[in-house]
Amino acid sequence: MVRRAQGTSAGLSRERIAAAAVALVDRDGLERFGVRRLADDLGVDPMSIYNHIKGKAALLDAVSEAVLAEIPAEPGVVGECWEDIARRTAHGYRAAGCRHPHVVPLLATRPQTSPAALSALERLVTAMREAGLPDEVVSDTPTVLFGFLNGYLLAVLGGGAPNVPEIDSALHPTLAGLASRMAGFGASEDFDRMLDTVLAGIRSRADGPHG
């Protein structure tokens, strides 16, 4: 691809660069992601990218932000409780992760402080506070919820848990008996069941005694 000379206007913007970076990661994976490859895709000199986004780390953050921005920021409906918001957020996050599996490690390992991420968390913790949940439970919930979501996506999209190896029933009889249930847990109904378990745990803490 022919590059524009450094400093030549290429119609670049942070949004266009981020979208191209997401497409590059989707296509080639994080291991092959680099500024020069991105510049080739955009048909620009690498320094033109740095005029908008300062460095590879900032580019990776822009990739995460662009993917999180795909999650619909639906306004709350009348009577929507914190569990409804948590469920809607979790399903949107799962869908975004499944569309961009190579981006999931970034979502799981880098701080997510983009407006889209913070707005989603603000809706959730505000609803929890309005419902009278203790601040300790409210403040723990983002880590608990997204710890589950990131672990789930890494396992499902990384090819780990859905293919459970054969287990020696003589050595591990209980695991062997559960193997068929542990295989292929990437289905939507399995995700909902696990999410129910997470939310039930948060709810039980909210209902229990607090110091």
Image (tube, helix red, strand yellow):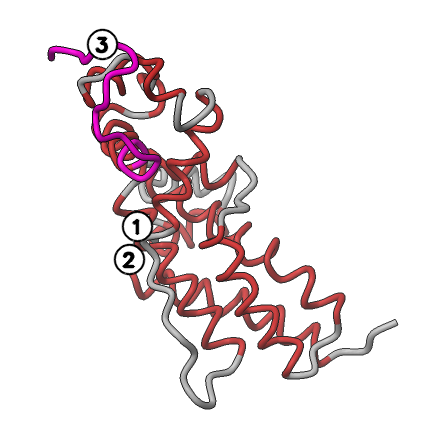
Q: Quadrant of the C terminus?
A: bottom right
Instruction: Using the image, determine if residue 155 lies above or below residue 95.
Output: above
Which amino acid type corresponds to the residue marked 1 in the rendered image?
Answer: Gly
Which amino acid type corresponds to the residue marked 3 in the rendered image?
Answer: Ala
Circle 3 residue: 5
Residue at the image position 62 percent from the left and 75 percent from the top:
128
Residue 153 appears at what percent x and percent y? Answer: 40, 46
Is residue 4 on the magenta stretch?
Answer: yes
* Disc nearer the start of the sequence (3/1): 3
Which label lies toward us, 2 or 1? Answer: 2
Quarter of the image where one finds residue 169: top left
Quarter of the image where one finds residue 65: top left
Circle 2 residue: 187
First to last magenta residue range: 1-18
**Crowdedness of circle 3 by 10 Å Cα count: few (<14), some, many (20+)?**
some
User: Whole-Å distance between the Cαs marked 3 and 1?
Assistant: 50 Å
Along the horizontal axis of the image, is 194 left or right of 166? Answer: right
User: Whole-Å distance between the Cαs marked 2 and 3?
Assistant: 49 Å
Residue 98 appears at what percent x and percent y? Answer: 29, 47
Q: Which mark is residue 111?
A: none
Residue closer to the observer: 29 or 21:
21
Circle 1 residue: 184
Residue closer to the observer: 180 or 173:
180
Residue 61 appears at what percent x and percent y? Answer: 46, 34
Instruction: Using the image, determine if residue 23 lies above or below residue 206.
Output: above
* Disc nearer the start of the sequence (2/3): 3
